[in-house]
Amino acid sequence: MLRRTTRQAQDARRSRLLEEAGTAGAEPTAWRLNREVIAPRRGWPGAGSGRTPYTDRGAVYLGTTVEVAGIFPFVLGSSLPPEGVPIGPDLLTHELVCFDPGGWVGRLVQNPGVWIMAQPGAGKSAITKRIALVYSSYGWMIVVPGDVKGEYAPLVRALGGQVVRIGRGLDRLNPLDSGPLRRRLNALPEERRETLLAEINGRRSDLLHALLATPHGLGRRPTAPEANVVGAAVEQVAGRLADDPVIPDVVRALREGPKELWDRLLVDDLDEYRTLVREVTLALENLCTGPLSGLFDGPTTTPVDLDAPALSVDLSALLTAGDQVVASGLLATWAYSYSAIDSARALGMMNRPLVLPLDEMWRALRAGPGMVEAMDSMTRLNRSKGEVTIFVTHSLRDPESLPTPEDRAKALGLMDRCDSLILGALGTGELDRVNSQRPLTSEERALVASWSAPNTTGLDGTNQRHPGRGKYLIKIGSRAGAPARLDLTPAEESLYDTDKAMRMRRTVTE
């Protein structure tokens, strides 16, 4: 019935058109065009004619002219959640990219560790400080236990934090300091007190073993008899003194050689005892004389303030003394600061989460086996302790340069346990090494390589801005990376300035 009605209507319309045209034979052009353009309700019948039993009404999308003009016609992965630290606009979509390794644990990441790698001058320290600054506003404590170049000190001071400057004529730090535990020991039950004393003495012995492995000590790991007698000397001195012992106290005990130390070494005469302890005793004395004199051979002059919003142990005064002195300083300051925090947590004196930036990672790795083990331990426990550890380096060759296979394996494992990877400008060779550890797509590698600059000196001989400065690829786990650009505020530009020394040197030259 419907088809007949439609046909009758079409015939009537055709007759009306013929009358209007005033002809009796030929079809008018208007009717022919009308028949070709106006299709039946279900489309033209036949193959390829678009006939369908159902006509989709379609979807209507509304947007402003700015939004519609920015439509990207390709498929993109979902962006990172807008939580945590605002980094800057996405280089492809221009939407805001945020970063929150601490808040994403259990959802996007399983480990809050962050691995940052880029060429010098590309902005590694800038994004590290942005992360630390924003986390500080959320109540996290920034702890920089080894600020080698002193570049975090302005930020820490601006936040009202504490800066401890290690150097001759400045602050002195006792590596054997027990931190806040000493003030609480007498108030604890005897059994609990003995347990904590054993824990303190164990940490002291571990630190001395690590310092002995540095070039200023033995230059190697202590042997079993050496490690045994050093631990026994630490226990003896700590039990005899009312205050925290210092390294000269341990040296004095080893030189005196009481009978208790003979028993630990299973020797019966003084000559045999001296033969076993001579080398390790002289190595400990080296830590109190020469380039390290006045740094770690006495009581701590400025105890760390665990109530401060931020803490920086500034080692920049040691740079002129050479890498070996800096390496020993890093071990001592890391052990002291981290032990003080751990001790406070054990007694319930501190429950704030931490941000631990480890800039200039190559220096820390070369400090000795103790530093590698400390960093390895942090990456395994940072989730349970509420710590965001940030490892900053130039190249994966830094871990590969360690002397022993065990240390190299531990150092390379640090990157694997950091679920968040931030890459700045890198060359193709370095990207190949990264790809062997954390697979990158060909597009991601090409993008990061395009930011690199083998030469940043202009034709006039002046240093030019690195073309990749402020550009980062943020990869979370196996997700597609989000390329973002970091634009600093005026306040950040003054606090994060790492080129000040170069500008001053250039001004003096001119």
Image (tube, rainbow, N blue to C red):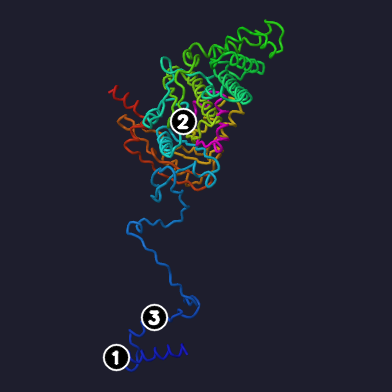
Expressed as whole percent of the image width and height from the top left, the position of residue 472 reads 43, 41
Q: Which residue is mark 1?
A: 20
- For the residues labelled 1 and 2, the Cα–Cα distance comes to 92 Å
Amino acid type, callout 1: Glu
Tell me the residue that label 2 is attached to: 143
**Labelled disc at residue 238:** none
* Residue indicated by mark 3: 38
Q: Residues within 10 Å of mark 1 (few under 14, many from 20)?
A: few
Q: Viewed as shown, does residue 87 lie left or right of 225? A: left
Determine whether the residue tagged by mark 1 lies in a helix, strand or loop: helix
Task: Work out whether mark 3 precedes mark 1 in sequence or the reverse, and give the earlier one.
Answer: 1
Q: Is residue 128 visible?
A: yes
Residue interval drawn in magenta: 361-388
Main secondary structure of the magenta stretch: helix
Residue 242 occupies quadrant:
top right
Q: Is residue 227 inside the magenta stretch?
A: no
* Marks 2/3: CA–CA distance: 75 Å
17 or 265, which is in the foreground? 265
Which residue is painted at 51% across and 34% down in the image? 351
Which residue lies most toward the bottom here? 24
User: First in sequence: mark 2 or mark 3?
Assistant: 3
